[in-house]
Image (cartoon, helix red, strand yellow):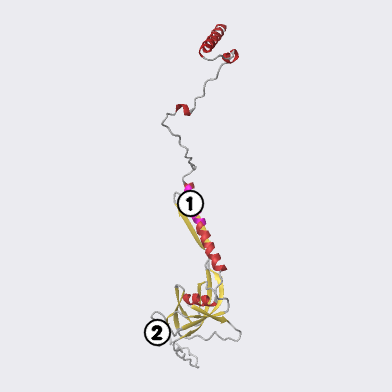
Amino acid sequence: MAHRRCLHSALLHGTALISLKKSPPLSIVNALTPKPNPVITTSNLEPSWFTPWFYVRHFSSRKSDDSENEAEMEDSSDVEEESDEMASDMVRDYSPGEKEAEAAAIGYKVVGPLQRSDRVFKDYEPVFAVVQIGSHQFKVSNGDSIFTERLKFCEVNDKLILNKVLLLGSPTQTIIGRPILPDAAVHAVVEEHALDAKVIIFKKKRRKNYRRTKGHRQELTKLRITYIQGIEKPEIKTDGKPLKAADKKPEKIAAIA
């Protein structure tokens, strides 16, 4: 070991003397101190024509993360649009002319609130009508109750006139509109505004880890039909005599002697 140390020190001194002859004079301390090896970096290994790539890419842990983010963005945008539409409808103030025009487009007209002195409910009449409210058609008679989609601009106990009458019928005649009967009308009263049973909306995209569950309750309006106008009502014949049950004759049983 000592021999190796002596050889190593001799080599160091020799290299120092040779460097002093070729390079400008340096201090003996700097010459004798060992210099660290140069650090090998990637820049030293790169060729002159190589240009470094500085584009940074962000990788997700799962492929489904991107699709989930996109789906969530779409859902959030849809919800925001729906909420904006509902807010605009609630905030908007309609003029009386706009209310009448929109109600007429749906198929009804608001007459006014029901008064205590009004006798709108009448006895049953053998007459029926087919009316259109919005995009739905109903076959109604006097005294029937129907559920429609929520009607705007009307409150409970308001009297309505349904203008879009497509057909009228009775035991003696039938009147068909082309497509609407201009002189016919169906009178009704708003009984309540209610909510329909909940409907579950489930969405799924396979192999994307995408599942969405929502519930919806449709707003409804209950109408009570009070009177059908535009057709002759036949008279209901009622006899004062009650119907008698048929008399059963006693069966004779032959006596066996």
Q: Nearer the viewer, residue 232 or 239?
A: 232
Hey, which quadrant is residue 29 in on the image?
A: top right
- Residue at 50% in and 59% down: 78
Residue range in magenta is 66-76
- Can residue 209 be seen here? The reply is no
In magenta segment, residue 68: yes
**What residue sits right under mark 1 in the picture?**
70
Q: Nearer the viewer, residue 156 or 9?
A: 9
Query: Circle 2 sits in a helix, a strand or a loop, which is it?
Result: strand
- Residue at 52% in and 13% down: 19
- Above or below residue 111? Residue 20 is above
- Above or below residue 230? Residue 196 is above
| Rendering coords of residue 65 (x, y %) | 49, 47
Q: Give the residue type that dot 2 points to.
A: Ile
Q: Residues within 10 Å of mark 1 (few under 14, many from 20)?
A: few
- Above or below residue 17? Residue 67 is below
Hey, which quadrant is residue 131 in on the image?
A: bottom left
- Can residue 80 be seen here? The reply is yes
**Disc 1 vs disc 2: which is toward the camera?**
1
**What residue sits right under mark 2 in the picture?**
175
Query: Circle 1 sits in a helix, a strand or a loop, which is it?
Result: helix
| Rendering coords of residue 158 (x, y %) | 56, 79
| Rendering coords of residue 77 (x, y %) | 51, 57
In magenta segment, residue 117: no
Quadrant of image for the C terminus: bottom left
